[in-house]
Image (cartoon, rainbow, N blue to C red):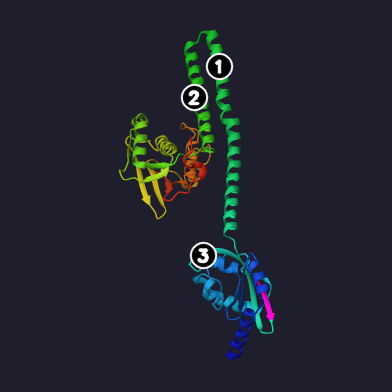
Amino acid sequence: MEMDRESAAHAANTKFKSDSSMFNMIVDSVPNGLIVVDARGEILMSNAEMERMFGYEKGELVGQSLEILVPREVRTNHVGLRAGFFENPSKRQMGAGRDLRGIRKDGSEMPVEIGLNPLVTAQGNFVVASVVDITERKKMDLMLIKAYEEVQQKNLEMEQFVYTVSHDLKAPLVTSSSYISFLREDLQAGRYTDLMDSLERVEKANKKMHELIYDLLQLSRTSRMELRVTSVGLTQLISETKKDLRDQLAEKKTNILIPDNLPVVQGDAKRLTQVFENLIINALKYAAVFENNLIEIVQKETEKDWEIGVKDNGPGIPVQYHKKIFALFQRLDNQKEGTGVGLAIVSRIMALHGGRAWVESEPNHGATFWVCFPKQPNFPKENHDGIH
């Protein structure tokens, strides 16, 4: 019985080899990869596109087992699936709803779509498989998903922006208007003590409005900024930031410990200064609540990234706020100064550098704000050696 099957397969193979040159030209002109396989999994024919796609020479696939085109970890299971197809053959997509992968001759993998069509002949039953490399489609799908997520994020930020303009900007104006009326009354009545109090309140409201407008402008620039990418030594950059903030550090009785072996990364020095300045100011604002406060710059190295943390010894942040605080206009304590824009700017700048920002913290155990830098960043062309 086994000899009969082998004879039939040999006869089929001979038949395929004896097909006319016109037929071979037509098959080779098909833009999809095509192979014909028998019930034992032997490849009886492949077209030029199939060979090109998988990296084989002309005719090299013929006579090989189909499983050489399947990732090693699923080959055993694939044999059973192939046998099941021949028991119940039908025209259909292979693995509908699942991500299928093919393996090239050099061992690299690619996402594929495979259409199966049973072929019944006098020599036996075969399957014609049509194979399409969908690598570019997968890339496009990921780009569309990313674009959709970005649009959703922009919509959310626009809603927050509208709320801020209508509420947060309006509040200082209302305050100023009210106290200007009081100023007029105090001047007319000669109440100079009350006059100074009203002036201070107007000044405070105007300062708050100025800060908010400034931060909104800063945030808008991160949406359209171009990066001037150079090699940036983080030890030097953060040390210079520490010098620039020395007055605020002294006022808050806070010291910063900076390792002398922080990595050199690829990025825009001006924007990365913004990142660490915002993180340090954030720690001073919310964590520097003791007599002796400490901010420590820490680092981790992974296979693909450098991770740099700004660690404080403050009261910590409950886990339910870990993502919220990076959103636009979000603050944990509305009694503190600030507009809730700083961490949103940090997140955006790190995204432009191919990294991200996050926080690790527990109440009463301080917080560490992390940013990561890819060791092999892929900056958009327009952001490389750009102009600020």
- Tell me which amino acid carries mark 2: Lys
The amino acid marked with disc number 1 is: Ile
Which quarter of the rendering shows the N terminus? bottom right
Disc 1 crowd rating (10 Å Cα; few below 14, some 14-19, many 20+) is some
Q: Residue under label 1, please give it.
A: 180
| Label 1 close to label 2 by CB (< 8 Å) | no
Q: Residue at x 61, y 87 (%)?
A: 5
Quadrant of res 138: bottom right
For the stretch drawn in magenta, the main secondary structure is: strand
As drawn, 172 above or below 11: above
- Above or below, 234 against 7 in this view is above
Q: Residues within 10 Å of mark 3 (few under 14, many from 20)?
A: some
Give me the C-alpha separation between circle 1 and circle 2. 15 Å
Element at label 3: strand
Can you tell which of label 1 and label 3 is closer to the viewer?
A: 3
Residue 117 among magenta residues? yes
Residue 207 numbered tag? 2
Foreground of the two, 102 or 299: 102
Which residue matches tag 3? 109
Q: Which tag is nearer the camera, tag 1 or tag 2?
A: 2
Crowd tier of the residue under label 2, counting other residues whose Cα lies within 10 Å: few below 14, some 14–19, many 20 or above:
few
Instruction: Please report the bounds of the magenta region as a residue range.
Output: 116-120
Q: Residue at x 61, y 90 (%)?
A: 4
Which of the marked residues, 2 or 3, is nearer the chain's N terminus?
A: 3
Calculate the distance from the C-alpha at mark 1 to the C-alpha at mark 3.
Answer: 71 Å
- The CA span between labels 2 and 3 is 59 Å
Taking the spot 57% from the left edge, 54% from the top edge, the residue there is: 142
Lower sequence index among marks 1 and 2: 1
